Image: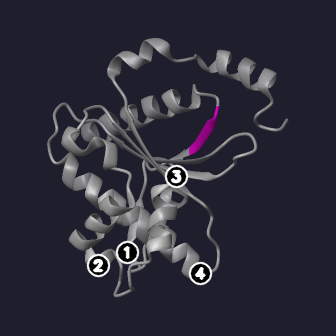
Amino acid sequence: MVAEGAHMDGLVGVKYAQQYLESTTHITLPFNVYEDMNQTTFVRLDKRLKRYDLVGHFLGERRRPLAVENKAYTGVGKQPEDYTEYLANAYSITARECEDGVDTEREFMWLTTHPFAQTKWARLRSPEEIAEALAKHPEALADRKLDNDLLARVASRLWLIPLHDRHRELLLERKELFKIHEALNRRGY
């Protein structure tokens, strides 16, 4: 019963993150880890699988794929450690795609309900921070050499967004969102 309750809490949090991001009218996230496990799973260099809470893409001309990690913390908790692993995963997944001959230009987004690492917040998306994360998680490199160009590329594709519960008051309803998408034509139809 506890696992089912935690599952439901997680799904509620993911649905809120989805509604928030889609309300920007710049993103669509049709897949979540609770209902679409295959679509939300990516392979790292070491062949380990990493699942993201939400997967979709940007709308309009950008149309890049997007993988979202949603963290609903009431305090800092182990978020700094989780974020470090997130950085290592983003690099490893991107490096794997590049090795396979297809850089999808996937962007990675971290949504959190509680800020963390405030003393270094401004650099949490930097190539140096990713390199430090890989030093803590060398298995994500799978014996490959660190690529400085790839570090910069991955850093440019990272998002870090604090999401407060009060943001719910600013969200568009589904029917409002459909009307706006129709007017903006970001979906291309």
Q: Is residue 125 above or below residue 164?
A: below
Q: CA distance from mark 1 to mark 2?
A: 10 Å
Residue at mark 4 to residue at mark 2: CA–CA distance: 19 Å
Which mark is on residue 100?
4
Q: Nearer the viewer, mark 3 or mark 4?
A: 4
- In-image side of 70 versus 75 (left or right): right
Residue positioned 74% across, 18% down in the render: 179
Q: Quadrant of residue 172?
A: top right
Q: As displayed, is residue 161 above or below residue 80?
A: above
Q: Are marks 3 and 4 in contact (CB under 8 Å)?
A: no
Q: Secondary structure at mark 2?
A: helix
Q: Indicate which label's residue lies in the foreground, 3 or 2.
A: 2
Question: Counting other residues with Cα less than 10 Å from the Cα at mark 1, is it few (<14), some (14-19), or many (20 or more)?
Answer: few
Q: Mark 2 and mark 4 in contact (Cβ < 8 Å)?
A: no
Q: Is residue 150 magenta?
A: no
Q: Amino acid at mark 3?
A: Asp
- State whether residue 20 appears in this view: yes
Circle 1 residue: 48
Q: Secondary structure at mark 1?
A: loop
Does label 4 or label 2 sit earlier along the sequence?
4
Whichever of labels 3 and 2 marks the residue nearer the N terminus, that label is 3
Mark 2 — residue?
A: 139
Q: Where does the magenta region start and end?
A: 26-30
Check whether the beta carbons of the residues at disc 1 and disc 2 lie within 8 A of each other. yes
- The residue pinned by badge 3 equals 36
Q: Is residue 77 above or below residue 177?
A: below
Name the one closer to the observer, 174 or 180: 180
Task: Residue type at mark 4: give it.
Answer: Asp
Q: Amino acid at mark 2?
A: Glu
- Mark 3 vs mark 4, CA separation in Å: 23 Å
